[in-house]
Amino acid sequence: MDVIVERPAALDVHKAQVSACVRVPGEDGERRSEVREFSTMVGGLLVLRDWLKAHGVTQVAMEATSVYWKPVWAVVEDDFDCILVNARHVKNLPGRKTDVKDAEWLCQLLEAGLLRASFVPPKPIRALRQLTRYRKAQIKERQREANRLHKALEDTGIKLDCVATDILGKSGRDMLDALCAGTTDPEVLADLARGKLRAKLPALREALVGRFEPMHALLVSSILAHLDFLDEQIERLSDAIEEQLRPFAPAVELLRSIDGIETRTAQNILAEIGVDMSVFPTAGHLASWAGQCPGNDQSAGKRRSGRTRKGSKWLNTALNDAAMSAIRTHDSYLQAQYQRLRPRLGHGRALGAVKHSILCVCWHMLSTGELYRDLGGDYFRKRDPERQTKRLIAQLDRLGHKVTLETLPEAA
């Protein structure tokens, strides 16, 4: 194989140790390999960096092994051109599986220029990504804890959620706190209602009759305390995310102009794809990397399953939230796209097409800096009026009607 990188290095990263291989020109003109193992402690990684520098390494490749590659990347990224590769793309030959062999094989592939780098965002975006992902995890935990509260109340026979829309609102929270404090009189509890809920006092008195025992008080009070803690954590994380996003505020405003995307969703999308779209040559490359487009699987002239590849689950969740909101936006292009595809493809695939469109729009907007311009809910009807007319005439013909067209003066 031709030598593309003269002094490459490859790292096979594990939890406690790193196997490193460098390939450099030998004295006799032949290529020679040197292999060493290093600890993944900070001291060992600094020794690894110095060892790579001593060999004049210019490019370093490593496999994306769980999260173990991250501390290694942080130490070497400022001094070398680093490449993170998908382990599936660089599998070693069968029967030659050792850490040293993996590092040597990876180094030979890098030397020949046969590695395809995975997308690793810059440091500010990586920091933002950690914050948004942890906030999403805390939000999901809060949802689970709220579900536990509903189950606990069902066990007591109290049907507060049948009357109050949000049992964790001000009125509902006051009633729950009073229950945990030992108040079980439905009259007293119902009188804690505020605002519009006071119009439902008779129903509240009936719903608050139950068997709220000391065990339930301990359980519900613990759940409420955990919910308060999670609310505080989510608020702290949101403040930190806004501070981290301050340099990228224009990008957030751009994405917020898309139907279905609000501030939190825009923050999550930017944390996953970054703001520099030059790393993706086209919108299609971004959609493919994110796993938001059909796969290609064709052999012997037959097209097999076009299942999408796996992408970031965090990005997929953000796009799913945006798409579900967009298809409820009346007289919009995204809603029209969904309604046009759903009868033929079903809800899941139609929603996937909307997610793909949203991601492509994000790429174009972040590349050009232009605000979103909706094409309108009648875009597909007006795109090809002649074809639409023929389709409707054909439908009437199949129903046994004879159609005569007359152009109206206003439309002429």
Image: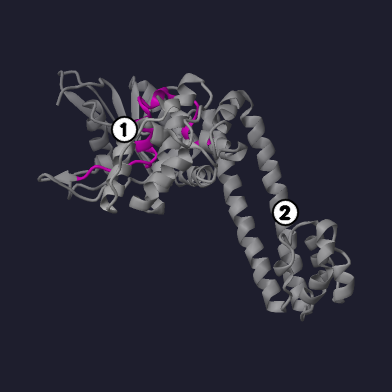
Height in image: 281 above or below 217?
Answer: above
Residue range of the region highlighted in magenta in the rendering: 271-297
Q: Residues within 10 Å of mark 1 (few under 14, many from 20)?
A: few
Say whether residue 230 is left or right of residue 395: right
* Circle 1: residue type: Glu
Residue behind mark 2: 229
Please, what secondary structure does the residue beneath circle 2 have?
helix
Residue 220: image quadrant is bottom right
Residue behind mark 1: 386
> Which x, y percent locates residue 140?
59, 54
> Which x, y percent locates residue 316?
46, 45
Q: Measuring 69% from the left and 47% from the top, which residue is drawn there?
A: 233
Please, what secondary structure does the residue beneath circle 1 have?
helix
Mark 1 vs 2: CB contact within 8 A: no
Height in image: 326 above or below 189?
Answer: above
* Circle 2: residue type: Phe
